[in-house]
Image: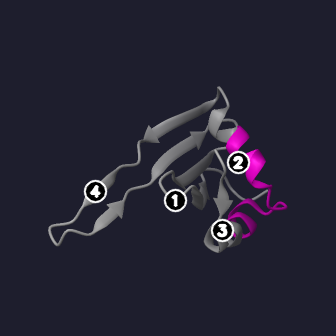
Amino acid sequence: MKLALTEHFIDRWRQRICKPVPPPSFIRHLLRHPHTLRLQKGRRLVTPEGSECNTLTIYYYTPAGLLLFIDHFNRTAVTVMTTVGRN
């Protein structure tokens, strides 16, 4: 799967992880890693007005305490959070 990093993802990685921003291939590797748990599956929904809305898939990479929010429909990494303090 091809994956793009949004500006928001890049900014949050720099702010919260405080390490160089990894390439999309590394994020794809984390998503397939055996220590990564999928907490929520993304869905494509239709609003009452008839427009489409995507929910994000949420992954938790346990060794580093990373929460990755991915839009699989648009193939983008949207944001990242951490459960541990800054390094």
Residue range (magenta) = 12-29
Up the image or down, 51 lies above or below 65; here it is below
Give me the C-alpha separation between circle 2 and circle 3.
Answer: 14 Å
Q: Secondary structure at mark 3?
A: helix
| Circle 4 residue | 45
Residue 11 image position (x, y, % from top left): 69, 72
Contact flag, marks 1 and 3 (Cβ < 8 Å)? no
Depth check: 79 or 19 in front? Answer: 79
Residue on which the image places disc 3: 12
Amino acid carrying mark 1 in the image: Asn
Q: Secondary structure at mark 2?
A: helix
Q: Give the distance between the C-alpha atoms of the residues marked 1 and 3, in whole angstroms.
A: 19 Å
Residue 64 makes an appearance in the image: no
Residue located beneath label 1 in the image: 74
| Residue at mark 4 to residue at mark 2: CA–CA distance | 25 Å
Ranked by sequence position, the earlier of labels 1 and 2 is 2
Distance from disc 1 to disc 2, alpha carbons, whole Å, reads: 15 Å
Up the image or down, 50 lies above or below 3; here it is below
Front residue of this view, candidates 84 and 57: 57
Answer left or right for 77 relative to 39.
right
- Residue name at image x 41 percent, y 48 percent: 42
- Amino acid beneath label 2: Ile
- Work out whether mark 1 precedes mark 4 in sequence or the reverse, and give the earlier one: 4
Q: Residue at x 63, y 68 (%)?
A: 6
Please tell me whether residue 34 belongs to the stretch shown in magenta: no
Looking at marks 2 and 3 on the same chain, the residue that comes earlier in the sequence is marked by: 3
Horizontal side of residue 67 vs 2, given as left or right: left
Callout 4 amino acid:
Leu
